[in-house]
Image (cartoon, rainbow, N blue to C red):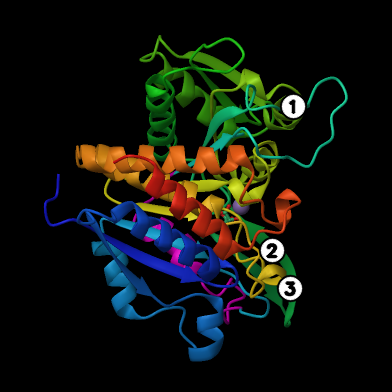
Amino acid sequence: MKDSGYSIAVFAGDGTGPEVVREGTKVLAALAEGGSAPWHLTEYPGGGQYYLATGREWEPDAKAAAEAADAILLGAVGWPGATLPNGDLAGRALVLGLREQLDLFANVRPCKLYPGVRHRISGTFREVWTPRNVDLVIVRENTEDLYTPARGRLSRGGETEVAIDTRVVTRKGSERIVRAAFELARARPHGAPQDGRKRLTCVDKSNVLEGCRFFRETFDRVGAEYPDVERDYAYVDAFTQWLVRDPERFDVVVATNMMGDIITDLAAVLQGGMGFASGANLGYDHGLFEPVHGSAPKHAGHNRANPFATFFAIVQMLRWLAERHADPRLARQADRLESALASVLANGTARTYDQGGSVTTSAAGDRVADAVRAVPT
Ligand code: IPM
Ligand code: MN
């Protein structure tokens, strides 16, 4: 437990990022009312729009602050036309760069459908997905695979002839992500919605790819240490249909980076859309928490983005800090926030445009802040 409080570096970033982060800080302030906040936030500029304005993705002090902070809260990065000279996304330093620099190897993305949240698929056999059958977590490897910066183009006579991305799967990288996923599956109190079993599904393409065969071997070797967790396997192509058809089968899912990127967006549909999808980028020493939806340029500046993904990212952040520092104050605050979120979602008073409502981003933040105040400390 840190008596001095926890330092949180905040990067609002681009597009809708600042709009949802503003609501996140509002809700953190509501949590802290009536006592002294066990955290202090410092905001730093950066991202694609900042790059267009200044020629820099962020400032050197921001990079150092991210490294020194107890936790990092990120809005979103990416803006049309904001590209680095080498063709990379301007603002990548804040997301891909920090994943590399701070070795944030585990991207933990919960996918839970709360009562009162609508999803955009209409049902036939049943209400398609109900809160009863969507409660899983996808654990995505976050530092290697196709994201390894071993890529390039081969040009001859000024003409590009070949573009290469290298898929790198290492023993160390696989072991630590698989172990993190087994630990999470072991710790989850209730297992899969279908049968209450603790289950870890390894999603890969090991019928074709060598890296995936290696990943699955590691999964089996490490998994032998977790006899209380059922080992389950799915090829990624088949997984996409099972996830949509029978989400209740899944408890925790582990995947390599690129496949994890794709299946987490698909999974977000089950929880009401990207407006609810949060992610924790975790290493042994650092944690970065973010809504997964990105900067959504076409919605930026309209005060209509759904801030719930940011609120859920804050729940993840408080829980992670609580566990890491054995601090029950933060665990209580995480519980308070989660129950406030559940109550606002259940009564449908903060439905933003993506939920078929017309509540603004800032009004949704006000509802949640009020609900936080109503939950006893
Ligand atoms: C994500 C995003 C990032 C990724 C982008 C913004 C680089 O899609 O966090 O899922 O590809 O990992
Ligand atoms: Mn993605």
Q: Is residue 186 left or right of residue 235?
A: left
Helix, strand or loop for disc 3: strand
Q: Earlier in the sequence, mark 2 or mark 1?
A: 2
Q: Using the rendered view, name the quadrant where residue 49 is placed.
A: bottom right
In space, the residues marked 3 and 2 are separated at their CA atoms by: 8 Å
Q: Which residue is mark 1?
A: 238
Q: Which residue is mark 2?
A: 163
Instruction: Point out residue 75 in the picture as x, y percentages from the top left corner.
Output: 50, 63
Q: Which residue is at a point 66% across and 45% down the rendered structure image?
A: 265
At label 2, the amino acid type is Ala
The reply to whether callout 3 and callout 2 are in contact (CB within 8 Å) is yes
- Find out if the beta carbon at label 3 lies less than 8 Å from the nearest ligand 1 atom: no
Instruction: Mark 1: give few (<14), some (14-19) or many (20+) Cα within 10 Å.
Output: few
Q: Which residue is at a point 67% across and 72% down the rendered structure image?
A: 302
Label at residue 160: 3
- Is residue 103 highlighted in magenta? yes
For the view shown, which residue lies furthest in the bottom direction? 54
- Is residue 95 highlighted in magenta? yes
At label 1, the amino acid type is Ala
Instruction: Point out residue 137 in the picture as x, y percentages from the top left corner.
Output: 53, 32
Give 295 or 285, whichever is nearer the viewer.
295
Residue 143 in view of the camera:
no
Q: Is residue 52 left or right of residue 187?
A: right
